[in-house]
Amino acid sequence: MNIKRSLVIAAMGTGLTLFGVAGASADPWQYNHPRRVEVNDRLANQNYRIDRDYRDGAITAGQARYLHQEDRYIRGQERFDARFDGGHITPAEQRALNQDENGVSRQIYRDAH
């Protein structure tokens, strides 16, 4: 069972990586809008931390689901904000998103320890 789950997780990770590479070349904002890149890189890092802690048994499936849901909300807010400024986010919007990310980061740390 663990081998099957590991293979599925590895396949999903590979698929997401390939999709991300394809998406990176199709989205010129990644090169032109460093505030969005910074926010999305932090979200990707938090996603990795959640998955790692779940895989290591430091958090439960319910905790991982809740934390992923919080990250999806932040990503949605980032996209919403960017729609109203020609694909950019303002420094104030970045600060607000970073504060939200800080809160999720603290939850990941707290839940895993």
Image (tube, rainbow, N blue to C red):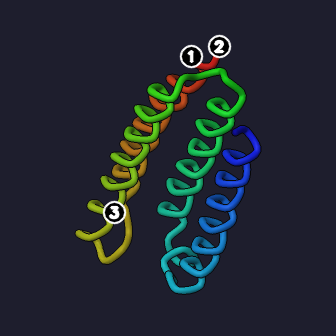
CB within 8 Å, label 2 to label 1: yes
Identify the amino acid type marked 1. Answer: Arg
Residue displayed at 37% across by 47% down: 74
Q: Secondary structure at mark 3?
A: helix
Classify 10 Å Cα crowding around label 2: few (below 14), some (14-19), many (20 and above). Answer: few
On-image quarter of the C terminus: top right
How far separated are the C-alphas under marks 2 and 1? 5 Å
- The part of the image, by quadrant, that contains residue 52 is top right
Quarter of image, res 84: bottom left
Q: Estimate the spatial distance between the alpha carbons at disc 3 and disc 2, rounded to whole Å.
A: 32 Å
Residue matched to label 3:
79
Check disc 2 and report the residue beneath it: 113
Residue tagged by mark 1? 110
The quarter of the image holding the N terminus is top right
Residue situated in front as seen by the camera: 5 or 96: 5
Q: Is residue 92 left or right of residue 33?
A: left
Residue 41 position, x and y percent, is 59, 55
Residue 101 % position (x, y): 47, 38
- Pick the residue in front: 100 or 5: 5
Tell whether label 3 touches label 1 (CB within 8 Å). no
